Structures are given as structure tokens and as C-alpha cells.
Image (cartoon, grey):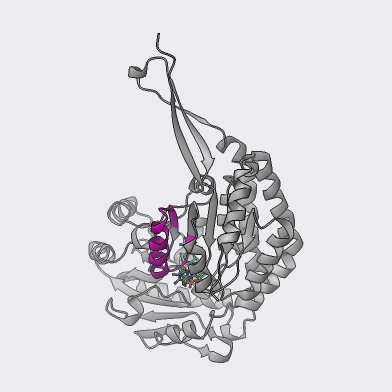
């Protein structure tokens, strides 16, 4: 029998209509309760992340629990201000009138999450939905059952399902949920599934945020500080075994500095993950056999500079750098999402820019240079979701920068006030005085 969520959605709608979630104090209370629940379940969450992905406790705390706690703190400090009606300007033609923007929650939010940061990418959108005053149904990934299970238990213990519900299951569960009418859908996952989500949302004219993936380039220009670049690219690429949506997917490096840079990168990999990474007990494994086989097939592209070792029984692939890669190689066709870094050298930055803009718009782009003109040329000529100059991935760790993609890498954004705004409709009101 196929799953049916009509009853759950009706119960949530009835709860939303009580107006309880519109009370800002209720939202604050919910967020505080969530913080307490996360503290109570901290060890279970970390153990689940270890089981699902072999994520170390340090990494799990920093990138999943700590990240969310930081976001909640920022939201709690600001939600009263964000939730207040805001004055807007009024054209003179209306005389002595006034204009206001009234923030109101959409209603029922459906959140669908992926497996790579299974706690963070489920709970960070959830706190956006909560702080804006919505009810929420959360569908975590089926590929991280331990983490999804703890999440479901934690939510169930603390919140009634007519307010916040976690529904575990496979793709079919999302399909069944998508048949119901939600007021907002927040999806994080692959571009292909993003298209399915958007067409399902269109049936109910439900607005969507799509946080998708893609191939994010990393450019190291001839004037870059190579030690800095090697250290920050190694960290951004190989943390979580490259299974990070904003990980640098491939490296474009100026010919004149390539050899020196690759030597430094080899050194950095050893320093960060050990002389023999296969003996590092904390190196994240690949999520499943399908991805392990898909990634292993890339290892004979180009020339291996470092890495290339695999252990199928424990889904281990060593951090690997592949030199002499061409744009046409298999590893350059789709998002890699694993610990493999293809390297393409360049002579002329303009050609590189042309190559990038011919392809789908990336979720992120990273540029290492000390030259402001180079920076302006890259920023002015390539469209991408967001990124860093002289760093990788850290742009997503600040509540002051909304995070999201553009084109094939997504639409909409969140984090900080972006999370409140995403789950909020701003009602525009013009108030006139009575006619004389
Ligand atoms: P996925 O698209 O396969 O799955 C994501 C979610 O969608 C899961 O909960 C899954 O059950 C559900 N789903 C799968 N097929 C579905 C279908 N046919 N209909 C409805 N729902 C379906 O993605 P994934 O493999 O879990 O995650 C990896 C992808 O996510 C990568 O492309 C990565 O770049 C992207 N990602 C993006 C971000 C971001 O913030 N932009 C963050 C993390 C991951």
C-alpha cells in the first residue's frame, strides 16, 4: 500500500490555523527546546554520524551540531526584530498615507534533506521554518538511517507531530509527501531530483527553494600564495571525503605554478590526513557501493599525483589528485562528490572563464589571487551561487551571507536572516486616510 500523508497535513494545517506558531515567543521557546534536545542527544547524533559516514566526533560536532547551534543563537538574537512589521516609503501621490511590510509565515513547510551532512542539512532549514512561524514536515535521507532515526526520535520526543514531524523513508516517501499541498518546499539534493521536486510543486503552485549541486571550480592564479592555497584547498576538498556540495570540484591552475603547487598539496594531504590515509580511523568513507563504484571509475583519468588507493569492503577512497586532465574526460562531466581532484592547467585566464561559462552555473567558485583586477574579472564574468577569494567553502559558515545556488545549482538561499526571509511572505499594505 502506498503511503498517504493527507491526515498528517490536515492535522498540521489545523494546528497552524490556531495561530500558535505566529506568536514569536512560541517560536523562541521552540528553538530553545531544540537546543536542549540537541544537547541531550549530542552523543547519539555523533555516534549515528560515525555509523552512517565514519564521520569523526570532532568533525561531526563542528560541521553538523555546532553549525546549527551557532545558527540558532544568531536567530534567537534577531528574530524579534525580523518578525516586526517594517515601514516602507509611500509615493507622494497618495498624500498622507503609510506603507508597511507585514512578515507572515507561509504555513506548512516541507523540508527534504540529503545524506552528506544529514543532521545539519535537515535541521538548518527546519530552524528557518520555525523562526518564521511555520509548521514543518521533515524528510531526511534514507542513506543515513542512523542519523535520520535519531533525528526522528529527538523531534518526536519534543514536539507534537501536528507542529513538527519527521517522516523517514526512501524516494517514494518524498513522492507521496509531494502529492499533498504544502505552502513552501525546501529541497536540498541533486539537480536531477530538484527538477522532479519543482514540477511536483508546480501542481499546487507551491514556492520552492532548491539547494542543488554541480561542479564548483577552484582557480589558482599565478600570483597566488601557494602555501595558503594548498592548505585551504586540501581542507575544502577532502573533508567529508569530498562529499560536500560546495567542495572545490576541480582545480584550474596557472601553468607556471602547477608543479610547485602540486608538491605543496601532497605535503598538505599528508599533514592533514596522515602519511597513509588508509590507516586514518577518522577519514570519512564513501556513502554506498553505487557511489564507490562511480568514483573508482574516475581513478584512471589523467595521471595520479597522489592517492588512488581504494578499499571496497569499507568504502574507502584515498584523497586523490589527478593531473593532465582534459575538459572532455569523464571526471569532468558531472559533479564528482568524492575525494578526487582533477587538475587542468591554463595559460590564459580568459579561456578558463569561457570554459566555465559554457557549462551549468556552479554552486560555488573559489579564486586564489592577490590581484584585485583578476578578482574583478572573475567575479564580473562568471555567474555562480557564492564562493570565496583565497579560501574554500567557508562562505557558508557565516550568517551574514545568504547561501544558495543559481541556475542549475539552485534557487533561493538561506542561513541567518536569509532563513527567516525564505520561510516568510511579506504582505505589502498601503494605508490611506479617509476621503474628505
Ligand atoms: P538526492 O537528490 O538523491 O536526494 C535528496 C533527497 O531527495 C533525499 O531525501 C531523497 O530521498 C529524496 N529523493 C530522491 N529521489 C527522489 C525523487 N525521485 N522524488 C522525490 N524525492 C527524492 O541527493 P543526495 O544524493 O542525497 O545528495 C547529494 C546531492 O545533493 C549532490 O548533488 C550535492 O551537491 C547536493 N547537495 C547540495 C547542497 C546545497 O546546499 N546546495 C547541500 C548538500 C548536498
Q: Is residue 200 magenta?
A: yes
> In this view of the protein, which residue sits in the foreground, 36 or 378?
36
Q: Residue furthest right?
A: 40
Whether residue 32 is situated above or below residue 248 in the rendered picture: above
Would you say 433 lies left or right of 350 here? right
The answer to whether residue 106 is visible is yes
Residue drawn 74% across and 64% down? 41
Would you say 104 lies left or right of 156 here? left
Which segment did they paint magenta?
A: 187-209
Return the x and y of residue 88 as percentages of the image width and height: 44, 28
Q: Residue furthest top?
A: 436
Return the x and y of residue 199 as percentages of the image width and height: 38, 62
| Quarter location, residue 369 | bottom left
| Quarter location, residue 97 | top left
Would you say 31 lies left or right of 273 here? right
Q: Is residue 364 magenta?
A: no
| Quarter location, residue 354 | bottom left
Return the x and y of residue 197 as percentages of the image width and height: 43, 63
Return the x and y of residue 135 as percentages of the image width and height: 59, 51
Amino acid at each position: 500500500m502506498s503511503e498517504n500523508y493527507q491526515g498528517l497535513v490536515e492535522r498540521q494545517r489545523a494546528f497552524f490555523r490556531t495561530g500558535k506558531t505566529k506568536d514569536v515567543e512560541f517560536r523562541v521557546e521552540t528553538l530553545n527546546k531544540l537546543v536542549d534536545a540537541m544537547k541531550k542527544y549530542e552523543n547519539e547524533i555523533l555516534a549515528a554520524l560515525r555509523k552512517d559516514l565514519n564521520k569523526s566526533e570532532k568533525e561531526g560536532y563542528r560541521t553538523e551540531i555546532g553549525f546549527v547551534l551557532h545558527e540558532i543563537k544568531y536567530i534567537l538574537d534577531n528574530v524579534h526584530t525580523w518578525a516586526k512589521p517594517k515601514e516602507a516609503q509611500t509615493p507622494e501621490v497618495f498624500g498622507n498615507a503609510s506603507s508597511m511590510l507585514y512578515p507572515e509565515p507561509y504555513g506548512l513547510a516541507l523540508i527534504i534533506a540529503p545524506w552528506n551532512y544529514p543532521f545539519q542539512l535537515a535541521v538548518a532549514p527546519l530552524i528557518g521554518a520555525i523562526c518564521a512561524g511555520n509548521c514543518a514536515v521533515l524528510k531526511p535521507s534514507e542513506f543515513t538511517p542512523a542519523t535520520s532515526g535519531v533525528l526522528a526520535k529527538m523531534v518526536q520526543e519534543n514536539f507534537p507531530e501536528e507542529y513538527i514531524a519527521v517522516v523517514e523513508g526512501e524516494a517514494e516517501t518524498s513522492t507521496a509527501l509531494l502529492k499533498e499541498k504544502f505552502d513552501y518546499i525546501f529541497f536540498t539534493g541533486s539537480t536531477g531530483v530538484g527538477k522532479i521536486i519543482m514540477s511536483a510543486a508546480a501542481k499546487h503552485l507551491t514556492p520552492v527553494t532548491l539547494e542543488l549541486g554541480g561542479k564548483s571550480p577552484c582557480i589558482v592564479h599565478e600570483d597566488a600564495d601557494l602555501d595558503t592555497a594548498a592548505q585551504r584547498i586540501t581542507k575544502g576538498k577532502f573533508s567529508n571525503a569530498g562529499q560536500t556540495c560546495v567542495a572545490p570540484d576541480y582545480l584550474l591552475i596557472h601553468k607556471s605554478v602547477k608543479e610547485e603547487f602540486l608538491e605543496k598539496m601532497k605535503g598538505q594531504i599528508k599533514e592533514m590526513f596522515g602519511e597513509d590515509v588508509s590507516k586514518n580511523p577518522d577519514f570519512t568513507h564513501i556513502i554506498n557501493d553505487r557511489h564507490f563504484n562511480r568514483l573508482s571509475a574516475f581513478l584512471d583519468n589523467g595521471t595520479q599525483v597522489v592517492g588512488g588507493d581504494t578499499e571496497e569492503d569499507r568504502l574507502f577512497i584515498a584523497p586523490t589528485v589527478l593531473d593532465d586532465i582534459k575538459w572532455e574526460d569523464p571526471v569532468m562531466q558531472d559533479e564528482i562528490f568524492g575525494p578526487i581532484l582533477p587538475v587542468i592547467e591554463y595559460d590564459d585566464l580568459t579561456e578558463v572563464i569561457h570554459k566555465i561559462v559554457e557549462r551549468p552555473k556552479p554552486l560555488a567558485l573559489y579564486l586564489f589571487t592577490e590581484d584585485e583586477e583578476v578578482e574583478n574579472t572573475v567575479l564580473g564574468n562568471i555567474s555562480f551561487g557564492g564562493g570565496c577569494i583565497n579560501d574554500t567553502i567557508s562562505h557558508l559558515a557565516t550568517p551574514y551571507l545568504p547561501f544558495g545556488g543559481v541556475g542549475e545549482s539552485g534557487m533561493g538561499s538561506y542561513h541567518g536572516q536569509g532563513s527567516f526571509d525564505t520561510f516568510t511572505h511579506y504582505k505589502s499594505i498601503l494605508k490611506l486616510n479617509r476621503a474628505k
